[in-house]
């Protein structure tokens, strides 16, 4: 058996630590340590006005790791922005970053190309957002609610304006992208765009929808382990 890893699983918008329950079981059954984090904003998304606040649980978790401990970060969807945030803040504590159908942009949303590649285009589904203006009608929306039949929760819109301190080069942190072939949220074409613009060390493919932690948990877990094994070679 390979050396046990410490996997830190980071959810995307609308989800929480709970969404990883199947993957956590698979990884722990394989002998690994797993931490699933809840980012802020699920109880009152209007109170979260910046990415630093939203990512606080992840940044706090990373700050309390032993100095000699390195973890494998796994992020889904917009959780990729949180991964990149942590990469810049805690470079020495990250062995590998795995992006699962995730937004993989080195600095967050800044250019039109970033937005095209990183933001899901849901216009074909009609009006799926309810925008609220908790800071007043003259300020940008502070939260979005997905009007869908799934039990997802509101999320702070500041995630889509993610900007954080750029504390040095993160190019030497190994990155793996897990591409979802049948994704209707972040399309395969969008994922390919991010892969071309910031090439990871490896690209793995899973034949699933946008949420493989539900629809293909065993296969996703195997790919996560496979990606982590490559760092030992």
Image (cartoon, helix red, strand yellow):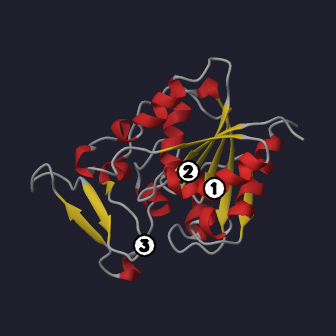
* Separation of residues labelled 1 and 2 (CA atoms): 8 Å
Please tell me whether residue 100 is drawn above or below residue 5 in the rendered image: below
- Residue at image coords 44%, 36%: 57
In the picture, which quadrant includes the C terminus? top right
Residue 114: percent from left, percent from top: 46, 55
| CB atoms of marks 1 and 2 within 8 Å | yes
Please tell me whether residue 187 is drawn above or below residue 97 in the rendered image: below
In the picture, which quadrant includes the N terminus? top right
* Separation of residues labelled 1 and 3 (CA atoms): 29 Å
18 vs 172, nearest the viewer? 18
Q: Quadrant of residue 147?
A: bottom left
Q: Earlier in the sequence, mark 1 or mark 2?
A: 2
Res 166 seen here: no
Q: Which residue is label 2 attached to? A: 104
Q: Which residue is label 3 attached to? A: 150
Q: Quadrant of residue 181?
A: bottom right
* SS at mark 2 in the image: loop
Q: Earlier in the sequence, mark 2 or mark 3?
A: 2
- Please state which of the two labelled residues, at mark 1 or mark 3, is closer to the viewer: 3
* SS at mark 1 in the image: helix
- Residue at image coords 45%, 66%: 120
- Residue at image coords 38%, 40%: 163
Q: Which mark is residue 195?
A: 1
Residue 228: percent from left, percent from top: 77, 43
What residue occupies the far top of the structure in this picture?
67
């Amino acid at each position: 058996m390979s050396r046990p890893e410490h996997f830190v699983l980071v959810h995307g918008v609308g989800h929480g630590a709970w969404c990883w329950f199947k993957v956590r079981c698979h990884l722990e059954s394989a002998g690994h340590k797993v931490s699933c984090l809840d980012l802020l904003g699920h109880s009152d998304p209007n109170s979260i006005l910046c990415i630093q606040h939203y990512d606080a649980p992840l940044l706090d978790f990373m700050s309390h790791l032993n100095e000699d401990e390195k973890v494998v970060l796994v992020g889904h969807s917009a959780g990729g922005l949180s991964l990149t945030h942590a990469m810049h803040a805690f470079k020495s504590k990250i062995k590998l970053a795995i992006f699962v159908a995730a937004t993989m942009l080195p600095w967050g949303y800044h250019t039109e190309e970033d937005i095209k590649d990183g933001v899901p285009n849901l216009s074909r589904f009609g009006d799926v957002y309810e925008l609220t203006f908790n800071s007043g009608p003259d300020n940008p929306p502070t939260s979005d609610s997905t009007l869908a039949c799934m039990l997802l929760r509101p999320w702070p819109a500041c995630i889509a304006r993610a900007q954080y301190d750029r504390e040095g080069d993160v190019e030497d942190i190994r990155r793996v992208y897990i591409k979802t072939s049948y994704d209707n949220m972040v399309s395969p074409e969008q994922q390919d765009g991010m892969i071309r613009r910031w090439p990871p060390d490896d690209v793995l493919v899973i034949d699933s929808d946008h949420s493989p932690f539900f629809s293909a948990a065993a296969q996703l877990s195997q790919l996560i382990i496979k990606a982590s094994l490559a760092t030992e070679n």
